[in-house]
Image (cartoon, rainbow, N blue to C red):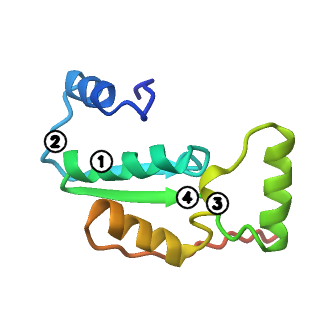
Amino acid sequence: MLGVDVRGESQVEEALGAAGLDWTAPTLILSEVVLTYMETQWSDAVISWAAKLLPQSLFVIYEQIHPEDPFGRVMQDHFLKLNSALHALQQYPDLSAQRRRFLDKASTQTRYTRFTVSHTF
């Protein structure tokens, strides 16, 4: 695991290179509530440079969507109280918008699914 500000492409590239990353190897990129916290200019740039630098990558996102539903409103209120807005939520509010985002920024194919977590007690 590396601690690096992903907004700085050259710093990320340097850190990953120093860690011995094989740029041509199949690579899983996991974003768990990362892109939505970033201002979209930065998170869009992350998607673009990741696709460019890691052409054999799979980008998996687990991000907040659907700001208009009851859970979405609760989450937005919660994060506003923490002074931590969900920046990408308005521009990319649903799976369709996320799919277009990746097609536009990464110029590649996309597949998506919606995960629903349920608990049985």
**Label 1 belongs to which residue?**
50
Q: Residue 12: percent from the left, percent from the top?
A: 32, 30
Q: Residue 34: percent from the left, percent from the top?
A: 55, 45
Tell me the distance, in whole angstroms, between the alpha carbons under discs 1 and 4: 17 Å
Q: Residue 98: percent from the left, percent from the top?
A: 49, 68
Identified at 42% across, 34% down, the residue is 6
**Label 2 belongs to which residue?**
23
Determine contact: label 3, label 4, CB under 8 Å. no
Q: How crowded is mark 2: few (under 14 residues within 10 Å), some or many (20 or more)?
A: some
Tag 2: residue type?
Trp
Q: Please identify the residue farthest to the front as the structure is shown.
A: 41
Query: Which quadrant of the figure contains the C terminus?
Result: bottom right
Tell me which numbered mark, 3 or 4, is placed earlier along the sequence: 4
Tell me which numbered mark, 2 or 3, is placed earlier along the sequence: 2
Tell me the distance, in whole angstroms, between the alpha carbons under discs 1 and 3: 21 Å
Tag 1: residue type?
Ala
Tell me the distance, in whole angstroms, between the alpha carbons under discs 1 and 2: 10 Å
Q: How crowded is mark 3: few (under 14 residues within 10 Å), some or many (20 or more)?
A: many
Tag 3: residue type?
Leu
Tell me which numbered mark, 1 or 3, is placed earlier along the sequence: 1
Q: Please identify the residue farthest to the left as the structure is shown.
A: 24
Tag 4: residue type?
Tyr
Q: Residues within 10 Å of mark 1 (few under 14, many from 20)?
A: many
Determine contact: label 1, label 3, CB under 8 Å. no
**Label 4 belongs to which residue?**
62
Residue at disc 1, secondary structure? helix
**Label 3 belongs to which residue?**
89
